[in-house]
Image (cartoon, rainbow, N blue to C red):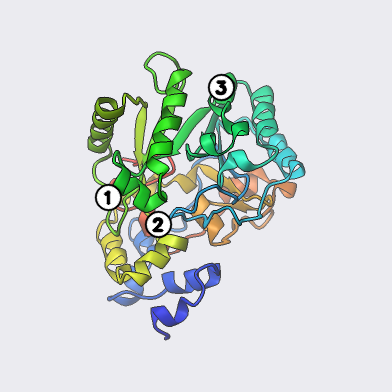
Amino acid sequence: MKSLKAQLHSLSDPKVEIDVLEQRHPGGSENDFQSYLERIGLFPLRPTSLEIFQVNVGKMCNQTCKHCHVDAGPDRKEIMDRDTMALCLEVIRREQTLNCVDITGGAPEMNPDFRWFVTEIRTIRPEIKLIVRCNLTIILANPKFYDLPQFFKENGVEVVSSLPYFTAIRTDSQRGDGVFGKSLEALKMLNAVGYGVEGSGLILNLVYNPSGAFLPASQTGLENEFKKKLWERFRVMFNSLFTITNIPISRFLDYLINSGNYENYMEKLLASFNPAAAAGVMCRNTISVGWDGFLYDCDFNQMLELKVAAPSTTHLRVWDTDGLSSRPIVINNHCFGCTAGAGSSCGGATL
């Protein structure tokens, strides 16, 4: 077998990433994610429900963050068109078990049809939970985005935003020079219209993921610390903090290999495997939609181009509720990231 570095000639190729993830650690096949699920009676892993409809509307972004699993950036051209959005809307209208639409990117706001999509969702399902994953700095990137806080408020959007830390040095090292200052300004703009303010009903949640090859600390402890520091230092408020484990794919996988941390990080994930977290992984109640309408079990599988294994459908054009509800969920060794410790999902720790 070739060495890791020999295989990693192009981490932008999902096949290369999967090849790396499938390599055996000490102990052989016993360390495959499938074998861990078999031991606890969870293989094949199947859905428990179809509740969360996560839609990636494009990989274009105004930032190029070091650990971005989407490999997003200003030069990405993949953008969901209105026809594909219309297919999403039809599913949202028809499938009443869906109780949450989670819009992500890239910077989803850079999609030219983003606002149309949001208002259409709110029109056809006024009661549904509607999340937009906003990177904060997009609000200040161009005058046409300055009114995003008000737009979010008018459409009852729950805002989820990444903030690696409550200091500039750690935030900027992960997300780029000047990001911390711009993020604070954007947070204050959101606070000004009511987001994160107790009793307003406007939810503003932050996302924390570690800056290196280690697992996040206690979500509750970090939330308390973030709230204290952001208020005392900057008079910034938010509702909840989500801790997310870095998944070993894309740019973070690149970092692990180049820093010599890949093997140790994977061993750390294996050693922290939690059966309770495995039972509650987000892919069991989520469908992830790619910018081109293809369907995936989760956002991470989407970036590895691992489409759903439902034999009757892999695309919005032929949505099959029964097939998707009974499908075997596609797994690989990157899934250890979601089952380590207190678990990890797009909504933070699962336990």
Q: Which element is circle 2 on?
A: loop
Tell me the kind of residue under disc 2: Ile
What crowding class fits label 3: few (fewer than 14 Cα within 10 Å), some (14-19), or many (20 or more)? some
CA–CA distance in space, label 3 to label 1: 38 Å
Q: Select label 2 or label 1 by which is in front.
A: 2
**Residue topped by disc 2:** 247
Q: Outermost residue toward the top?
A: 199
Q: Residue furthest right?
A: 83
What residue type is disc 1 on?
Answer: Gly
Q: Residue 35: x percent and y percent?
A: 37, 65
Describe residue 341's horizontal placement relative to residue 81 as left or right: left
Give the quadrant of residue 247: bottom left
Q: Residues within 10 Å of mark 2 (few under 14, many from 20)?
A: many
Residue sitting at x 44%, y 15%: 200
Q: Residue 95: which quarter of the image?
A: top right
- Disc 3 target residue: 150
Dot 1 corresponds to which residue?
A: 341
Mark 2 vs mark 1: which is more N-terminal?
A: 2
* Mark 1: secondary structure: loop
Q: How many marks?
A: 3
Amino acid carrying mark 3 in the image:
Gln
Q: Are marks 2 and 1 in contact (CB under 8 Å)?
A: no
Tell me: residue 206, above or below residue 280: above
Residue at the image position 41 percent from the left and 58 percent from the top:
335
Task: Point out the tag, 3 or 1, that comes first from the N-terminus.
Answer: 3
Quote the CA–CA distance across marks 2 and 1.
14 Å
Q: Position of residue 124 (x, y in %)?
A: 69, 25
